Amino acid sequence: MVEAQHTASTMRLVDSLEEQASLELVLEESKPPLPPEARRLHYLLATPFRYRPHVSSRFRAALEAGVWYGAEVLRTALAEKSYWRLRFLLDSPATPDLKPVPHTAFRAAVRTAAAVDLTVEPLVRDRPVWTHRVSYQGTQAFAAQARQAGIQLIRYESVRDPEHAACAAVLAPAVFGRAKPHSQHTWFIAASRARVRCARDERGGTSWEFTPEQLL
């Protein structure tokens, strides 16, 4: 689940498709190069491996190699994305509610023998560490050791999904057997400090709603 701003963000700055293509080329040249093993992949799969963000995540400390995060079910992906929308509002008290923003939901298949599952024995014995809602120190330390051991994927329990379905932290691009994602569709996510609402389209239809108590 990613914010669908890749096209609109540059389109607003230019007057024609030709100008947009030129601007996209300039931006591409300014970005860090993709790792060789990720160059065959569609950008939705490759992009996380391109950067070393200053902001850390559950299985990646600041400035460490990128991690691609996915969820086994759509609801979980929406909950994880909703958490970060809510966090943005809570960290900036003067910011008004966030209006509906389009996001792209997509599926990708992964396959590897070099994986660990934190939801089963013996690793589930340390569940309080893996599912800590605030501190990522334990999971980041585990991911660092996993990389050294050649692990390519970590399966873990989502703490944002009210039903605690599983997620995957992909540490290596090689797990994507298929170079392109599939089953892409659009969701709109609107956030206030009281709730985050996710809808398949702006007119209604399939939707989920998450409260701060669930996400935090």
Image (cartoon, rainbow, N blue to C red):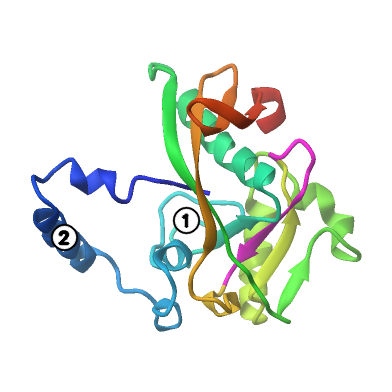
Is residue 132 or residue 187 the one in the foreground? Answer: 187
Q: CA distance from mark 1 to mark 2?
A: 32 Å
| Residue matched to label 1 | 62
Q: Residue at x 49, y 27 (%)?
A: 190
For marks 1 and 2, give the one nearer the viewer.
2
Amino acid type at circle 1 is Ala
Does the segment drawn in magenta span residue 195? no
Q: Where is residue 105 shown, x and y percent of the image?
A: 53, 49
Q: Quadrant of residue 48?
A: bottom left
| Residue matched to label 2 | 21
Quadrant containing the C terminus is top right
Q: Check disc 2: other Cα within 10 Å, few if <14, some if 14-19, many if 20+.
A: some
Q: Check disc 1: other Cα within 10 Å, few if <14, some if 14-19, many if 20+.
A: few
Q: Residue at x 10, y 50 (%)?
A: 16
Element at label 2 = helix
Q: Where is residue 214 shown, x and y percent of the image?
A: 71, 29
Amino acid type at circle 2 is Ala
**Sequence-first disc among 1 and 2:** 2
Q: Where is residue 35 shown, x and y percent of the image?
A: 40, 78
Specify start and end residues of the magenta stretch as a single range: 160-171
Q: Residue at x 49, y 75 (%)?
A: 179
Element at label 1 = loop
